[in-house]
Amino acid sequence: MYVVAVDFSVRPGSIDAFMPLILEQAGNSLSKESGCHVFDVCQSKEIPEQIFLYEVYDDRAAFDAHLASDHYSSFDSAVADLVAEKHVRFFHRIQMVTSPKAES
């Protein structure tokens, strides 16, 4: 599995505009992309403008299809002025361990 981790620093005063857009993007990726299996959106409790994403795809080709999608292009354009910094990292999943009590 191909894992993508993204750290966003949202501009001060922009988090209320950013959050609905990223949540819509997560839903679109999961519902419209057969190669996307996980799209977790996390927000720092201490610094609400810090957003962390964790995405899991079949492979690099599935992630490339995500980047080429209309919904990603729309999202990327919509948040361009809302984001101060964005850092993307790529990983290969070694093992997934889940609990039957997993929280949402």
Image: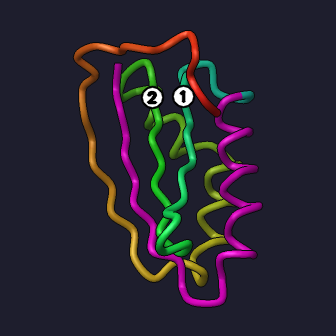
Task: Using a 10 Å C-alpha cutoff, classify the residue at mark 2 as few (fewer than 14 neighbours), some (14 to 19) or many (20 or more).
Answer: many
**Rendering quarter of residue 4:** top left
Q: Which amino acid is tagged 2? A: Val
- SS category of the residue bearing label 2: strand
Q: Is 74 on the left or on the right of 83, as rendered?
A: right
For the residue pair 12 and 65, the one nearer the viewer reads as 12
Quadrant of the image containing the C terminus:
top right
**Where is residue 10 shown, x and y percent of the image?**
53, 77
Which residue is labeled 2 in the image? 56
Please report contact status of discs 2 and 1: CB closer than 8 Å, yes or no. Answer: yes
Residue on which the image places disc 1: 38
- Mark 2 / mark 1, whichever is N-terminal: 1
Rendered position, 80 above or below 104: below
Q: In the image, what residue occupies the spot 62% across and 43% down?
A: 69
Residue 6's x, y, as percent?
A: 40, 54
Position of 4 relative to 52 (above/below): above
Which residues, given as a range, are shown in magenta? 1-30
Outermost top residue: 100
Q: Residue at x 62, y 19 (%)?
A: 34
Residue 99's x, y, as percent? 48, 13
Of the pair 39 and 102, the residue shown nearer to us: 102
